[in-house]
Amino acid sequence: VPSERNAPPTYPHSARRHGHEGLVVLRACVSLRGACVSVAVERSSGHTELDQAAAEAVRTWQFRPALLNGAPVEAEVEIPVRFKLTD
């Protein structure tokens, strides 16, 4: 689960200027310490700059690690990131 303190992705200036919006779905591997080990685009927004901005932000995020029998474990999580021009 992402921490509430994680900064949202920066809306790329070029995407905003061209009116690009969309939903990016990322798959992140989270370490047992809550760090993002890897991130991949599961479903593209259709705009490379939005996909890249979302992935760059998530790479820096801190997570609460998954637990198995009360102990933290590495796990994958799906993260939707929506870019709307009203943001």
Image (spheres, helix red, strand yellow):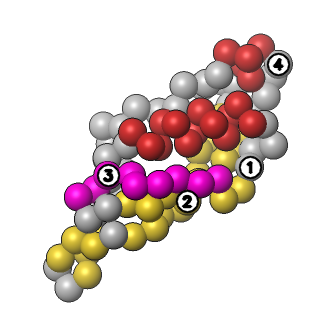
Return the residue at label 2. 27
Return the residue at label 4. 18
Return the residue at label 3. 35
Check disc 3 and report its element: helix, strand or loop: loop
Instruction: Indicate yes or no whether the magenta region holds residue 34.
Output: yes
Q: Which mark is residue 5?
A: none
* C-alpha separation, residue under disc 1 versus residue under disc 4: 17 Å
Q: Earlier in the sequence, mark 2 or mark 3?
A: 2
Which amino acid, mark 2? Arg
The residue mark sitting in front, 4 or 3, is 3
Q: Is residue 70 left or right of residue 61?
A: left
| Secondary structure character of the magenta stretch overall | strand
Return the residue at label 1. 44
Check disc 1 and report its element: helix, strand or loop: loop
Which contiguous range is marked in magenta?
33-41
Check disc 2 and report its element: helix, strand or loop: strand
The residue furthest front is 37
* C-alpha separation, residue under disc 2 versus residue under disc 1: 11 Å
Which amino acid, mark 1? Ser
The answer to whether residue 64 is visible is: no
Q: Are marks 4 and 2 in contact (CB under 8 Å)?
A: no
Say above or below: 34 vs 67.
Answer: above
Q: Quadrant of residue 20?
A: top right
Say above or below: 11 vs 60.
Answer: above
